[in-house]
Amino acid sequence: MTGGERAAGEPATGGHAAGEGAGGGERGAGTVLLIGIVAVVLLCMAGLSALGSAQQARVTAQSAADLGALAGASALRHGLDACTTAGRTVARNGSGLAGCVVEEGGVVAVVASRPAGHVVDLAGVATARARAGPASARTNGPP
C-alpha cells in the first residue's frame, strides 16, 4: 500500500476509529465551556440591571418626596390640605405616598416609595423622605 491508500475496513480518519485518539474523548468540551461563560455573563448583566433599576427607583422616589414636600408646604401656606397636595404631587412623579405629617411651624414631612424592580420585584421598595417649610421653622443646620 502506498501512503495515500487505506486497507479495507480501516476508517477514513487517519487510522483512528471515531471517538478514539487525539482529543476524541473531549469532543464538545468547548461547547460546554462556552455555555458556562455565556451563563455567567448573563447573570452578571442581570445583576447590574437590578442594581441600576434599584438606583433609578431611589432617585425617582427622592425627587417625588422632595417635590411633594415643597408642594405640601406651599399648599399649607395658602390654607389648603398639605397631605392631599403632597400625595397628588408624589403620584404625578411616579411614586406612592407612604407617609405625610404636618409638623410644628408649618413644616411638611413626606415619605415616598416606589418598587425597585420593574419586571420582578426582587430588589424591594425604594423609600425616600423629605421635609419642607418656612425658613423660620428651621431648628438646626446651616442658615
Image: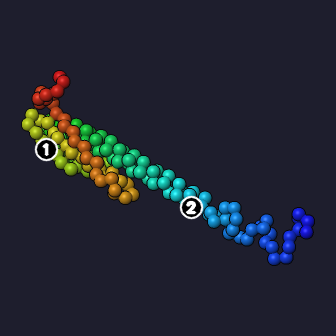
Depth check, mark 1 against mark 2: the one in front is 2
Quarter-wise, where is residue 20 in the image?
bottom right
Amino acid beneath label 1: Val
Secondary structure, mark 1, is: strand
Q: Quadrant of the N terminus?
A: bottom right
Amino acid beneath label 2: Val
**Taking the image as drawn, is residue 74 in sight?**
no
Would residue 20 be found to the left or right of residue 82 on screen? right
How is this picture coloured?
Answer: rainbow
User: Residue 17 has which mark?
Assistant: none
Secondary structure, mark 2, is: helix
Q: Which residue is drawn at the image coordinates 80% and 69% (left, top)?
A: 12
Mark 1 vs mark 2: which is more N-terminal? 2
Foreground: 116 or 64?
116
As measured in the structure, the alpha-carbon distance from the residue carrying label 1 to the one carrying label 2 is 58 Å
Q: Position of residue 11 (x, y in %)?
A: 79, 72
Q: Are marks 1 and 2 in contact (CB under 8 Å)?
A: no
Residue wearing tag 2:
32
User: Residue 101 has which mark?
Assistant: 1
Mark 1 surroundings within 10 Å by alpha-carbon count, few (fewer than 14), some (14 through 19), many (20 or more): some
Q: Position of residue 33 (x, y in %)?
A: 56, 58
Q: Position of residue 80 (x, y in %)?
A: 15, 42
Q: Which residue is drawn at the image coordinates 16% and 39% (left, top)?
A: 108
Foreground: 78 or 15?
15
Q: Residue furthest top?
A: 143
Mark 2 surroundings within 10 Å by alpha-carbon count, few (fewer than 14), some (14 through 19), many (20 or more): few
Q: Position of residue 142 (x, y in %)?
A: 18, 24
**Taking the image as drawn, is residue 76 in sight?**
yes
